[in-house]
Amino acid sequence: MTGATWLAWRSNRQAAVAGGALAAAAAAALVGVAIWESTQPEGSVHTLMDGFRALLIAAPGVAGVFVGAPLLSGDVERGTHRLIWTQGITRRRWAASSLALLIMASALAAAVMAIGGQIWIARLPSNFDTTWGLYDLQAPVVFAYVLFAVALGAAVGAALRRTLPAMAVTLAIFIAVRVAFVELARPHLLPMVTRVVVSGDQNQSVVAPGAGYVDTTFLNAQLQPLGIGACGSPGCVPGPAAGIPYAALGPNTPFRVVYQPASHFWPMQGIEAGIFILLAAALILAALRFATRDG
């Protein structure tokens, strides 16, 4: 490495090395437990489930706060950006080199951890829902979340030029975007399937196996909503499985079922990952613009 890239590495090597080491350690733990779990009896309880779920969900936000936000704001606060500019390096080259180093390191760390998480998910016992129930932990979206978070942190840090405020704002925006996307956008990434079925037929298959984001609405004889919902969470189905006896609804009570079929799972993963990667690219351009402005 020479020139601006070397200076960017010198300025941010501690964060890069620490982040890479943590990602590698997390991946090793995930793979190690996955191998151990595969040797346990079928149906055994996965005691580290909650911890690994929290790790994979929190990792992108942590990367954005502690790696992305301080990248450019830290140089400005320390005044090292002025020293760099005296070495014959323009503002744009300084910012571009720092951002390129950040993205490459983050992409590598994200890939390592995402692959480790995917191996862990693949080795979970069959009594776990490893599709819709672990949607946010799958490799494509985990990788995209990390890139989005670090790009968001870099953009906020370049805009605010103060590290601590940038870290707080990055975390708040990341959480808000993730929650809004999950609640408002994700269920509709692909067209949902709608069926009208009858509650009296206990042997009727309500939805295809592996469906997610199942929502039910009970209907009257004119097929108008009754305002009674059986359930609305991924993988939930009406009837006895949801704790509502068919008989309690009356014979032949119709209800409308809306759901995402199992065949939509991986295409939705790809679409969501693509959206967050595009957002990350836009944020990198914004960070470059903020970092090179006067003031």
Image (tube, rainbow, N blue to C red):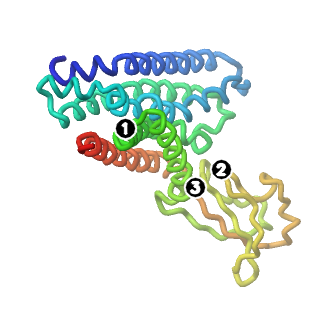
Q: Nearer the viewer, mark 1 or mark 2?
A: 1
Answer with mark 3 or mark 2, whichever residue precedes in sequence.
3
Please name the amino acid that badge 3 sits on: Glu
Of 59 and 246, nearer the camera is 59
Viewport quadrant of the N terminus? top left
Residue matched to label 3:
183
> Whole-percent x and y of residue 74?
37, 28
| Residue at x-position 26% and y-position 41% | 288
- Based on the displayed image, in which of its 4 quarters is residue 98 positioned? top left
Answer with mark 1 or mark 3, whichever residue precedes in sequence.
1
Residue matched to label 2:
235
Residue matched to label 1:
161
| Residue at x-position 50% and y-position 30% | 118
Viewport quadrant of the C terminus? top left
Left or right of 94? Residue 197 is: right
Of 17 and 146, nearer the camera is 17
Q: Secondary structure at mark 1?
A: loop
- Based on the displayed image, in which of its 4 quarters is residue 154 positioned? top left
